[in-house]
Structures are given as C-alpha cells and as structure tokens.
Image (cartoon, rainbow, N blue to C red):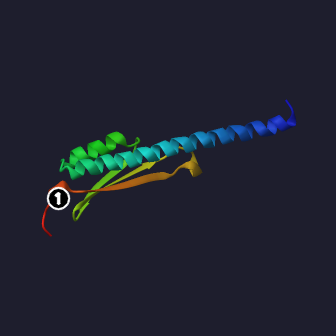
C-alpha cells in the first residue's frame, strides 16, 4: 500500500460516514414533517388528543417528542426528534404544522 492510499482511505471512509448520516438526518426530517401534518389533520377533525398524539408518533422517527396545542381556530402540532450520531453530528430536527379546526368552519365571527 502506498503512502497516498494510506492517507486517502480514512478520508473516504469519513466522507462515507458523514454522507450516510446526512441521508438518515434528511429522512428523519421528512418523517418529522409528515408526522406534524398527520397530527394536525387528525386534530382538525376533532379527534381526541390521545388519538392525535398516537397518529403523530406513529409517523415520527423514534424518540420524537410531539406537542399539540390549539390557538384560536388553528390546531398546531410540533414534532422534535434527535438525530443519531456522535457528538457534533447530533442535531434536533423539528417540524410544525397547523390546520384549521373543522368545528370553526362556517361560523360567523
């Protein structure tokens, strides 16, 4: 093995690890967005809060935290999930979705 190969192989391995981590983080971010949207839709349909949380958690990545709140006519669902990875590669991904509560549709102000 040449000295150049001995220098390049660890760099290529590190690059591959970072690339795989980035792909996993991107996939988890998409799952956070999907989970927030699914939870907001369920809340807008006036489903019980436990069902809304279950719906969002089912679509969210593992170890995700889900929060549901109503502010005026809108239901807001926020999903946060940590990414797997060592030290500096650990991030907290988050997504939020809002949906108009169906029980307010057609009401006079």
Which residue corresponds to the image point at 18% horizontal and 50% vertical from the top-left? 46
- Please identify the residue farthest to the right as the structure is shown: 2
- Please identify the residue farthest to the left as the structure is shown: 108
Q: Left or right? Give the position of 41 relative to 85.
A: left
Where's residue 104, x and y in %?
A: 16, 60
Q: Is residue 84 visible?
A: no
Q: Is residue 24 visible?
A: yes
Which residue corresponds to the image point at 85% horizontal and 29% vertical from the top-left? 1
Which residue corresponds to the image point at 37% horizontal and 46% vertical from the top-left? 34
- Please identify the residue farthest to the top as the structure is shown: 1
Disc 1 crowd rating (10 Å Cα; few below 14, some 14-19, many 20+) is few
Where's residue 77, x and y in %?
A: 31, 54
The mark total stands at 1
Q: Secondary structure at mark 1?
A: loop
Question: In which quadrant of the rendered image does the C terminus lie?
Answer: bottom left
Q: Left or right? Give the position of 56 relative to 14.
A: left
Where's residue 73, x and y in %?
A: 22, 62
Where's residue 60, x and y in %?
A: 37, 43
Q: 5 or 74, which is in the foreground?
A: 74
Q: 103 or 25, which is in the foreground?
A: 103
Q: Left or right? Give the position of 29 relative to 8.
A: left
Residue at image mark 1: 105
Which residue corresponds to the image point at 21% horizontal and 49% vertical from the top-left? 49
Q: Left or right? Give the position of 96 relative to 82.
A: left
């Amino acid at each position: 093995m040449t000295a150049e190969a001995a220098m390049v192989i660890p760099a290529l391995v590190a690059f591959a690890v970072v690339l795989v981590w980035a792909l996993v983080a991107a996939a988890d971010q998409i799952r956070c967005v999907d989970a927030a949207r699914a939870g907001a839709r369920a809340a807008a349909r006036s489903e019980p809060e436990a069902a809304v949380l279950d719906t969002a958690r089912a679509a969210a990545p593992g170890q995700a935290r889900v929060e549901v709140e109503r502010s005026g006519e809108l239901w807001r669902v926020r999903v946060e999930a940590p990414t797997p990875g060592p030290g500096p590669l650990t991030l907290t991904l988050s997504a939020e979705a809002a949906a108009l509560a169906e029980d307010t549709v057609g009401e006079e102000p």
